[in-house]
Amino acid sequence: MNKLKIPAVLVLAYLVLPLAVNGNDYVVSLIVAALTIGGIALAWSMLGNLGGMVSFGHAAFFGIGSYASALLTIKAGWPVLVSMLFAGLVAAASSIATMPALRLRGPYFALSILAYAEIFRIIATEWKGLTGGAAGILSIPRLPEIMGIDLGGKIGGYFVVVTLVIAMVGIYAVIRRSPQGLALKAMHDSEDATRVVGVNATMLKALMLVVSAFFAGLMGAFNAHYINFLEPDYAFSGSWTTLAIVAAIFGGYRTLWGPLIGALVVYLVDQLVFKAILPQGHQIILGALLGAMVLFSPTGLTPLIAKLTRLQRKETANAAH
Amino acid sequence: MFELFAQSAFSGVLAGAYYALIALGLALVFGTMRVINLAHGELVLLAAYVAYSAENKLHLDPLASLPLAVAVVGLTSIAVYGLLSRIKKDRELNSLILTFGLGVIMTNAILMIWSADIHSTSVPWHHDAIILADLLFAMNSEVFFGVAGLVVVAGLWWWLEKTWYGRALRAVASNRDAAKLMGINPQFTEILSFAVAGLLASVAGIAIYSAKVIQPSLGHHLTVKAFIITVLAGMGSVPGVLLGGMLLGIVENLTVTLASSALQELAGMVLFLVVLLVMPSGLFGRVRRRG
Amino acid sequence: MLHINGLTVTFGGLVAVSDVTFDMREGEVLGLVGPNGAGKTTLFNAICGLARPGSGTVELMGKNLLSMPIHHRARAGIGRAFQVPQPMHELTVRENLTVAQRFGAGKVDKAKIEELLDVLKLGHKADMDAATSLALTEQKALEVGKALATEPKLLMLDEVLAGLETTGKRAFLDTLEEVRKRYRLSVMIVEHDIETITRMCPRVLVLNFGRLIADGSPDQVFNDPEVIRSYTGGEPA
Ligand SMILES: Nc1ncnc2c1ncn2[C@@H]1O[C@H](COP(=O)(O)OP(=O)(O)OP(=O)(O)O)[C@@H](O)[C@H]1O
Ligand SMILES: [Mg+2]
């Protein structure tokens, strides 16, 4: 069953879904946005799950990635795909500035990252020569055409983002199984035991932060070229963080696919259902969802469903006897 | 030039007392439960909106709406406690996420009830200027709440240090199990701290409504301010909150005077990070190993 | 190979380890005994970095341990088994050993992990959750296993035999003896059972109220009047 999972996901992602929604630009753009948020949620979950750190400032890395890629293509004339990758690196590099915060725990870390996000946003607003200030940047180059597929179109953008997030899941899976990932997982409850066998926790956490920032930055870069427009309040908006946290908690931030599934469910339901019912303040449902998940199923939806199906299977098995 | 400095220092001190009002509730709850209530700013904002409704529907002066605000916000605050106390596992992380979610709920509830419009009091007295020593300018409400901030800080400090309830609160904060043995019901003191935090948030909310403008997205902002001040103060230190608030107020006002108002927030954030990273126990806190 | 000089650890007003000085030779098996609260675990903590000494020096093969962060000490050759077993949570038994090996020994050697699983009789539980599915003996075996996986020069065992019944204890002792010889280890072992100590350790140190009150062969030490007094509850002279 597990062996079938990966091909099934790939077929679903590259064949079924695009065929099902192609032509409906609105739905495609919603799915692209959901996957973009899913990418941030994944980046956020890596840090939370393996690093044991809650960040309220992942919008910082997202925003930096957006601006870096936009500026590299516009001011330096770099090709879009190269810029995106490099923008991820810029975001990763910017996370070095936040590393002193790694000494801090819990709420201190969470909110100091938020402070960094604010600082980065203000810099983007005030450094008008580079970023165009509050007015923003218009006409950011589109994604290119490759092998006859226009990546700049709606469905092309979908293929790019789905490839990015699946690659991220793959890398995350490798990290989780590596000794580094295992050590980080163990740190959570067994700090002393982990340290005395030679694990340098601070270093590993720093590495996790760099990887997480890279992924968030990459999503930002993609988004910049997908919507072709940036302004500081948008690129550094706290909503990127809020939505990602809700998605990750909802889907299960300790699982591999949970953050992505959570993002798809939460964002699509929010946009298609809640927004229709409550044009103003529909995010109230997201808050309620977050609270309910923490109280009733802190491990998230994916593990909950797994548990329920296992129960059900057991019951069917029992009934059969 | 001197006048500018004097004015910004004066405004900073007044702002500081008002900032302290915002932060006290957060610091108190952190002191008793080791929980950062990320919905605290929204509680403050809720009080401000209660004052707004009281003024428009009941024609009350913002100051007179305090009992109503205390009732609404106090109960909400206790409800927050009710939810928080249900967290079983991983309290540090889950309480952050839960209160963050509650903040989102409250922000959106405020948006739905009161719309996204900007409001401020229309009682003229609050916005009238007073001029001290021919030099320093302030609004009545700013001076009033600056003084009120001082009084509330002193009152809270007295309450914590000198009354039985306050001592019980501090006992629970420092050692929950030992407090139990002394016959203190930790749950009761925790509810008490949330109730008092609600009271403090109410005063702060009315101060904001009287002296500033309010809008639904302000709550998150207030939480961040409160957290910054609490860190500057050193977690759990009540007099420190006042000094931390004033430091932030003065730094922000000087930044506006000397540089630009666009950098006001930046100055606060940088101050916060520098203190957090260089002096993790805060400017005025006791030295305590964290974690 | 291990030189400890004037080592003192205090907690607030309590002096848990007081001016302790001793040397240990390569290949030695050193017993560490003393009444409850004597400071044995704290001494271990000071050596491996979990407690910060107020004064004194600790040198392992010429290297100053006290200036190293905890994780470097594992690389320098310290392997520590905890008194209360501390498996790395959320990992399987094999993963526990893998992490210890990767970070403590700086290499990945699957054959060595299998060998350890085999020697410590943990093979049948290798892929089970270490924190929840081990019996006490197995937990203790994993404690030793994690320490061994870091390829230590000095193996520090804190009451790894406590709580085991007689046959289990004997089997475990044999296992320990086997790994000691196979990996040519120096061993420092804390143990309350005098018979075990007498069998295993040619040399015994006695701690009482943090002070080192005796150092010698089991015969000498256990007949020392001060040691006897310390076990019958007397204050230090
Ligand atoms: N982290 C700590 N903080 C405060 N006091 C401590 C700490 N660790 C140990 N102590 C105290 O130091 C003293 C020595 O404790 P230690 O655990 O080293 O004794 P021990 O010899 O290992 O005892 P046992 O045989 O019971 O394991 C005890 O009084 C203990 O209460
Ligand atoms: Mg001990």
Image (spheres, rainbow, N blue to C red):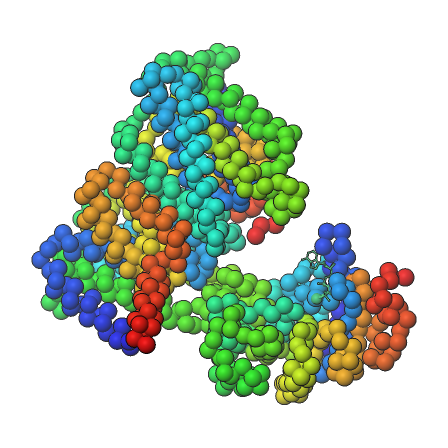
**Residue B13: x percent and y percent?**
51, 25
Looking at the image, is B62 positioned above or below residue C3?
above
Left or right, A39 with respect to B13, comes to: left
Q: Which of these two is toward me, C2 or C136?
A: C136
Left or right, A309 with respect to C114, comes to: left
**Residue B220: x percent and y percent?**
38, 38
**Residue C69: x percent and y percent?**
61, 64
Looking at the image, is A68 positioned above or below residue B271?
below
Instruction: State the residue at coordinates (75%, 80%).
Output: C196
Point out the residue furthest to the top here. B134
Instruction: State the residue at coordinates (9%, 58%).
Output: A23
Q: Quadrant of the N terminus of chain C?
A: bottom right
Q: Quadrant of the C terminus of chain C?
A: bottom right
Point out the residue furthest to the left here. A23
Q: Look at the image and tell me whether residue A44 can be seen.
A: no
Looking at the image, is C25 positioned above or below residue A209?
below
Instruction: State the residue at coordinates (38%, 40%).
Output: B103
Q: Quadrant of residue A190?
A: bottom right
Q: Which of these two is toward me, B217 or B161?
A: B161
Q: Look at the image and tell me whether residue C214 can be seen.
A: yes
**Residue A108: x percent and y percent?**
49, 47
Counting the numbered discs, the total is: 0
Q: Quadrant of residue A150?
A: bottom left
Instruction: State the residue at coordinates (50%, 45%).
Output: B35
Q: Quadrant of residue C18?
A: bottom right
Q: Quadrant of ligand 1?
A: bottom right
Looking at the image, is B38 positioned above or below residue C6?
above
